[in-house]
Amino acid sequence: MVPFLRRSLQAILLLFALPLASGEAVRLDGGWTFKPGDNPAWAAPSLAEGGWKPIKVGLAWQKQGYEQLQGHAWYRLSFTLPERLRQDDRLKEGLRLSIGQVADFDECYLNGQRVGANGQVAPPDSAPDPDFWKADEGLPGRPRVYVLRPDDPRLRWGQVNVLAVRVYMVSGWGGLTGGEPMEARMIDHADLTSLEPAREPFAFEGARLTKRVLLTNRSSRWQLRGTLEIQGAGLLSGQPVLARRLQVRVAPGGHQEVRFAIPQREEACRFTYRLRFQEGGVPMERIEESPYLLTPKTRRAPRINGPQVLGARPGNPFLWTIPASGQRPLRFKVQGLPGDLRLDPASGMIEGTTPPAGTYPLRIQASNAHGSDTRTVDLVAGPRLALTPPMGWNSWNAWGLAVDEEKVVASARTFVEKGLRDHGWNYVNIDDGWEIPENSAAPKREADGRIRVNGKFPDMARLGRRIHEQGLRFGIYSSPGPATCGGYTGSYGFEAQDAASYAAWGVDYLKYDWCSYSTVAKNLTSLEELQKPYRKMDQALRQVNRDIVYSLCQYGMGDVWTWGEAAGGQLWRTTYDIDDTWKKLSAIGFAQTANAAYAGPGHWNDPDMLVVGWVGWGPSLHPSRLTPDEQYTHLSLWSLLAAPLLIGCDLTRLDAFTLNLLTNDEVLAVDQDRLGRQATPVIQEGSIQVWARELSDGGLAFGVFNLGETAATYRVDLAKLGLQGSPQLRDLWRQKDLGPSAGAHPVRVAPHGVVLLKASRAR
Ligand code: GLA
């Protein structure tokens, strides 16, 4: 080709290859000032910033010398918005202001005018909302993006603009916490395109896994054109399972659906979705891993599951349903039921009054047309409760403050209908959000000090009955401070009345969350002050005639594991809040070492609740962002750690993978083992960690975890685990004997995955 022609052609191609937007961004991640407290006048562009201090964003304010653990604070930033940004832009859809993530709620102002709150844009001239922090959607990790049309009167093109962000922190770490780019730029075609394959998980259909992916064009004018490439390969085997390339063309406001299916495998497959825009620019890429089932199908013959030992206090009401799987109807028999305890032979529910102190072996039999199973469970009547870690559901990770009675009852019903109860899941716990908000004008308590409930929980005694009727136990939440972390009324000064209310409602479990107690306790380095509110509620709980499992929640302050039991707790949180990311999960889970010696029957370390299934901390939920292998790691590690297991998802949307994950009796038996030993890391080599715990039958459960980013082959030196000779090994997830193994046992572990084994050895 003639050089001239070639150059012109190149120039033309280059022109088409240019991204639609200029791509230039104004960074908003430096130069901020900060002031704790609240004053709507602080939004004004011309504010004299006396008393304001420079602050870093991307780091909580508590990590920068501000101690405040709850409440309001403001951030301000001046920045220039160059005229060329909108001039060079071809799409002209809008300016995108991104202030990253906020802990926990925000109201955003530009040049003195409100732009929106908690990521929702507001029209110009909208009035400040003092209740912006009562929205349910603020928590956690939701990126705060505000898009304004280029001609929006709040924007000052070519001039200095002042951004002011009013923040409210509920608990934990507060402020503009980064996590996402903080910038102002024109929106481009990738912003207008939604490709979120993980929003709709793979479905199990027969022997296949099917998938539907939706490509949406959110623009009102632009036509989306390009190619979508989907590639999938097994994570352990590396074997390709899918390679597809298709043309896409989506009209403004429209969507295109892509479907595919792959055979089910015994490994996760990693899928890459790459969308190339016809206009060029950076392709959009999404990665997703497909689920796989390890727990074998529940057999038709009965199998008794759950703990082998129960603790209950003499003279108190007793309620326990024998967890047993197998085809219904099942028929239960129990020999050795003491006192007035009665068994319902059809449901396996045992009710009545706990007998005088002593150990009562209950010889349980469950039978159906396919066979029978027997097991002895020791009922230990005495002062101790939770002789194995509590297992159940808690509303927080799913519903946050959007929880209500029907959602709780729906969870209880699912425990029964989906058979979770048959595998030992039995507490149904409300978290924050059931009292009257602390700043409401309505009375928080009756004249005699009794706590009042809000409209979402009209009748607590009725809710208690509805849960108990299902053979399940009822849990509740409060704070020793005047307010809970979510801003509802706490128990401060009314501990005895609250314990009495809980007893009257039939409560079986209390999570007692520090939150605003910081406004009462002035010295957080004083152990006595840390313990005081917990001891106080413990005394109140001991005055009522119910077995109320007492869960201390104060995020591990003052090494709570060293004194939690003495303060009356059966379990205590050892960390700040978990979320559904590998970063949080691995940072919490693999750090549970210093506290290991303090776990045992009746006293457990609590690394926080499970983040599997549909979670969301508010009204809109999403499937856990953990990959399937990360979820196997979650359940395996928590079981090895003898952690309380509280499911934190919407149980009405329980998918096949999550149900399979939560109903593996051999894995759960590790968690529930009556010896109550917490695993410790025995081997750490590169990205491999082997955590092991002794079991009551003389066996050793151990998990080989791969914290690395690629599949690993590893030989476990059994001698390092204290295993001599040739112990029999069993794969607990697959419930399969592997036979005797000696020396080094080879395993192949997926990235962020686990192989969970049990070695049997003679006592
Ligand atoms: C704290 C706790 C969470 C949850 C919320 C409720 O953050 O750690 O588990 O109970 O409060 O507001």
Image (cartoon, rainbow, N blue to C red):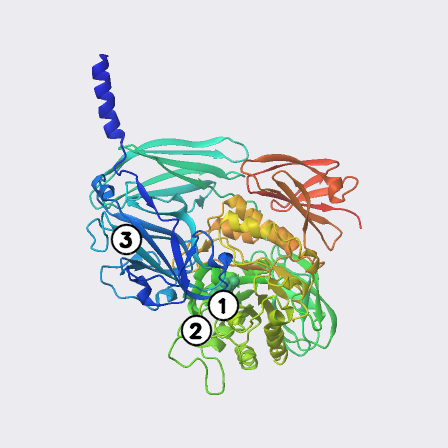
Left or right of 8 on screen, residue 281: right
Q: Which residue is mark 3?
A: 161
- Around disc 2, counting alpha carbons within 10 Å, would you say few (fewer than 14), some (14 to 19), or many (20 or more)? some
Quarter holding residue 535: bottom right
Q: Is mark 2 within 8 Å of ligand 1?
A: no
**Image coords of residue 592 (percent x, y):** 63, 53
- Around disc 3, counting alpha carbons within 10 Å, would you say few (fewer than 14), some (14 to 19), or many (20 or more)? some
Q: Nearer the viewer, mark 3 or mark 2?
A: 3
Alpha carbon separation for disc pair 2 and 1:
10 Å
Q: Are marks 1 and 3 in contact (CB under 8 Å)?
A: no
**Image coords of residue 141 (percent x, y):** 43, 53
Q: Secondary structure at mark 3?
A: strand
| Amino acid at circle 3 | Asn
Q: Secondary structure at mark 1?
A: loop
Q: Are marks 2 and 1 in contact (CB under 8 Å)?
A: yes
Disc on res. 457: 2
Residue at (33% x, 64% y) in the render: 42
Q: Is mark 3 within 8 Å of ligand 1?
A: no
**Image coords of residue 135 (percent x, y):** 37, 64
Disc on res. 345: none
Q: Is residue 324 visible?
A: yes
**Nearest to N terminus: mark 2 or mark 1:** 1
Q: Which residue is mark 1?
A: 430
| Amino acid at circle 1 | Ile
